[in-house]
């Protein structure tokens, strides 16, 4: 049987970004929220693992809480860089692993498509659904690693917090939007108790 994900499996890497604090949910690791027969992270790993040989989690704090997935847990190199710090961490790991691109996926988006990586190649590309852009659901060429490091260093020197917006850096490297059907938004993310209720209604049991 032919491999349905040849480019994703052998050339790239996937990093689930789990650095959020879940403040609107009382403070929590959103990927560990119960969902269906498991948790949010179970859904993401089950969806993404078949498409790529290299899969990791970007998270700070005690890595043991993610131990049962037997995946590398990658902490940010520096606090205060926001989500772009997670992207840089993903690029660091992907480059060391010999990948040519990395897909980042937020850890609170349990319904992404199985062929997401294939649909977002060639990098750099990011997902869009309806009028909403999802710049963290994106493929990044490993070759942009040094540019992102320099971008973050400049943001720290100048104190320009606008430069920490993921969309700003993505635009600087010419990332293109890839439209997805918004009717059943595959990038629905969990931020509030109401979002969590809706996700549980949608998740298979």
Image: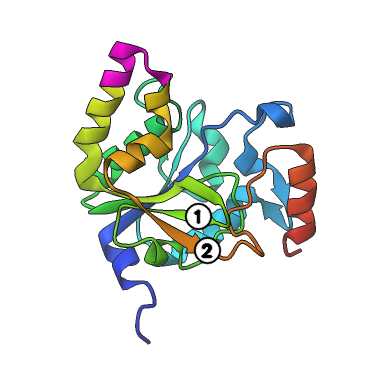
The answer, for residue 74, to whether it is visible in the render is: no
Provide residue 18's location: percent of width, then percent of height. Answer: 52, 38
Q: Circle 1 — which element?
A: strand
Q: Residue at x 48, y 34 (%)?
A: 59
Above or below, comparing residue 26 to residue 189 in the picture: above
As drawn, the residue found furthest toward the bottom would be 1
Above or below, comparing residue 82 to residue 47 in the picture: above
Q: CA distance from mark 2 to mark 1?
A: 6 Å
The range drawn in magenta is 154-161
In terms of image quadrants, where is residue 176?
A: bottom left
Q: Tell which of 172 and 205 is nearer to you.
A: 172
Residue 158 falls inside the magenta stretch:
yes
Q: Is residue 129 left or right of residue 57?
A: right
Provide residue 151's location: percent of width, then percent of height. Answer: 27, 27
Give the class, few, some or many, for how many residues have Cα within 10 Å of label 1's Cα (few <14, many ≥20).
many
Above or below, comparing residue 117 to residue 189 in the picture: below
Q: Residue at x 47, y 55 (%)?
A: 127
Whichever of callouts 2 and 1 sits on the residue coming sooner in the sequence is: 1
Q: Tell which of 169 and 102 is nearer to you.
A: 169
Provide residue 83's location: percent of width, then percent of height. Answer: 45, 32
The image quadrant where one finds the C terminus is bottom right
Q: Circle 2 — which element?
A: strand
Label 2, on which residue? 180
The image quadrant where one finds the N terminus is bottom left
Residue 53 falls inside the magenta stretch:
no
Provide residue 17's location: percent of width, then percent of height. Answer: 48, 41
Label 1, on which residue? 128
Q: Is residue 118 left or right of residue 45?
A: left
Q: Residue at x 59, y 59 (%)?
A: 186
Query: Badges 2 and 1: C-beta atoms under 8 Å apart?
Result: yes
The answer, for residue 53, to whether it is visible in the render is: yes
- Which secondary structure is most common in the magenta stretch? helix
């Amino acid at each position: 049987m032919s491999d349905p994900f040849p480019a994703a499996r052998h050339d790239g890497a996937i990093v689930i970004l789990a650095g959020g604090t879940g403040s609107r949910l009382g403070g929590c690791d959103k990927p560990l929220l119960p969902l269906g027969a498991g948790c949010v992270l179970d859904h993401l790993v089950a969806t993404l693992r078949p498409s790529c040989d290299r899969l990791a989690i970007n998270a700070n704090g005690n890595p043991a809480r993610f131990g049962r997935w037997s995946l590398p847990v990658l902490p940010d190199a520096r606090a205060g860089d926001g989500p772009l710090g997670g992207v840089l961490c993903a690029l660091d790991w992907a480059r060391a692993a010999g990948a040519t691109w990395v897909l980042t996926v937020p850890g609170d988006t349990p319904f992404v498509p199985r062929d997401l990586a294939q649909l977002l190649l060639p990098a750099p590309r990011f997902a869009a659904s309806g009028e909403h852009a999802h710049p963290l659901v994106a493929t990044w060429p490993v070759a942009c690693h040094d540019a992102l490091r320099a971008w973050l260093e400049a943001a720290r020197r100048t104190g320009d917090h606008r430069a920490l917006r993921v969309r700003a850096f993505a635009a600087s490297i010419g990332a293109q939007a890839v439209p997805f059907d918004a009717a059943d938004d595959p990038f629905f993310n969990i931020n509030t108790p109401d979002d969590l209720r809706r996700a549980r209604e949608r998740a298979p049991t």
